[in-house]
Image (cartoon, grey):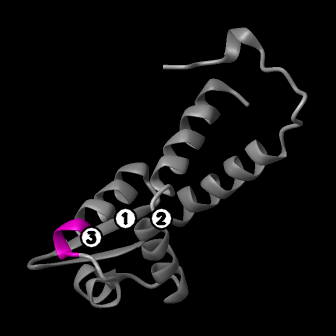
Amino acid sequence: MTVDQRIKTARYAKALSHPARLFILDYLIQNSGKCCYSGDMAEHLPIARSTLSQHLAELKEAGLIQGEVKAPFIKYCVNLENWEEAKDLLFTFFRLPADEKPDRDSVWFG
């Protein structure tokens, strides 16, 4: 993997590292990829709306979802291009041979 691919993989993995964010993505995907209002998601997830907003912000920052503001509501949907990229990068990462040593010049530990 290149440095850029590692950075993107880490960003996606971080966004996927909380059960509430996995629920949000699953909820959006199960709704046939349609956009959903954050208020509708709040009715199905046993967390405070402010906590939901924080998780939505994390997913949006990672690029996995996108939001559209129509005051006072915000609709969210999966960013399909980045979702596919995340799947490809994570699949590639998990398929790396366990005995493969990374090239020291291409490793970034920042």
Label 2 belongs to which residue? Answer: 79
Q: CA distance from mark 2 to mark 1?
A: 6 Å
How dense is the environment of label 2, judged by Cα within 10 Å: few (below 14), some, or many (20 and up)? Answer: some
Say left or right for 61 vs 107.
left
Mark 2 residue type: Asn
Q: Report the quarter where the N terminus lies.
A: top right
Residues marked 2 and 1 touching at CB (< 8 Å): yes
Predominant secondary structure, magenta span: helix
Q: Residue furthest left?
A: 72
Q: Nearer the viewer, mark 2 or mark 3?
A: 3
Residues marked 1 and 3 touching at CB (< 8 Å): no
Mark 1 residue type: Gln
Task: Give yes or no for residue 1 being in the magenta stretch.
Answer: no
Say left or right for 96 vs 85.
right
Label 3 belongs to which residue? Answer: 52
| Pick the front one: 46 or 62 | 46
Please tell me which residue is depicted at 17% across the width and 68% down the height of the picture: 50
Q: Earlier in the sequence, mark 1 or mark 3?
A: 3
Residue 89 vertical position relative to residue 53 in the rendered view, above or below: above
| Mark identifier at residue 66 | 1
**Residue 2 x/y as whole percent:** 69, 27
Q: Which residues are drawn in magenta? A: 48-52
